[in-house]
Amino acid sequence: MILNNGGIAVDISKVKAIKTEFLKQGGNLVFEFDNFVIPVENPDTEELELRSFPNNAVEYYIETSDSLRVIFDEWVELWGKFRK
C-alpha cells in the first residue's frame, strides 16, 4: 500500500523502521524496508528457492529540524495505523 504524505510516497507495507538524522541545517527522514524476497532457481537442483535480498534505506532531506520532527511524527502515526 503506497501512501503519500508531505510530498513523500512510500510503500508502507514494506517499511521496517522510520528514523531521523539531524544535520546542521535540517536533516533526513530515513525509511528502512523489509528485505526483498523472490523465488530463485537453484542451479544445482533446478528447484525454486526463496532468496532474501536487502533493500537499501531511502532518505528524504527536510530543510528544517522542526519540519523534520513534524513529518517524522506524521509518518510514524500512519505506519502505526497500517500495522494494526
Image: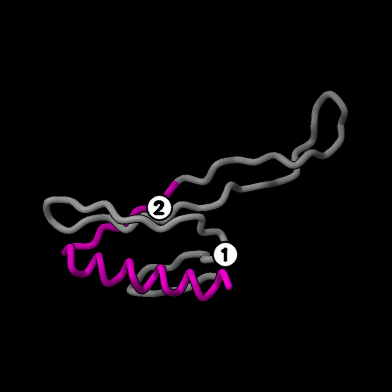
Marker disc for residue 58 = 2
Residue 80 percent location from the top left of the image = 49, 71
Q: Which quadrant of the structure image shows residue 39?
A: top right
Label 1 element class: helix
Residue under the image location 21 percent in, 53 percent down: 22
| Residue that label 1 marks | 13
Quote the CA–CA distance across marks 1 and 2: 15 Å
Of the pair 45 and 14, the residue shown nearer to us: 14
Magenta span: chief secondary structure: helix
Residue 51, above or below 63 = above
Q: Check disc 2 and give the amino acid type.
A: Val
* Label 1 neighbour load within 10 Å: few <14, some 14-19, many 20+: some
Q: In front: mark 1 or mark 2? A: 1
In the picture, the quarter occupied by the N terminus is bottom right
Residue under the image location 18 percent in, 68 percent down: 66
Residue under the image location 23 percent in, 62 percent down: 62
Q: Which quadrant of the structure image shows residue 41?
A: top right
Q: Check disc 1 and give the amino acid type.
A: Ser
What stretch of residues is rendered in magenta?
57-84
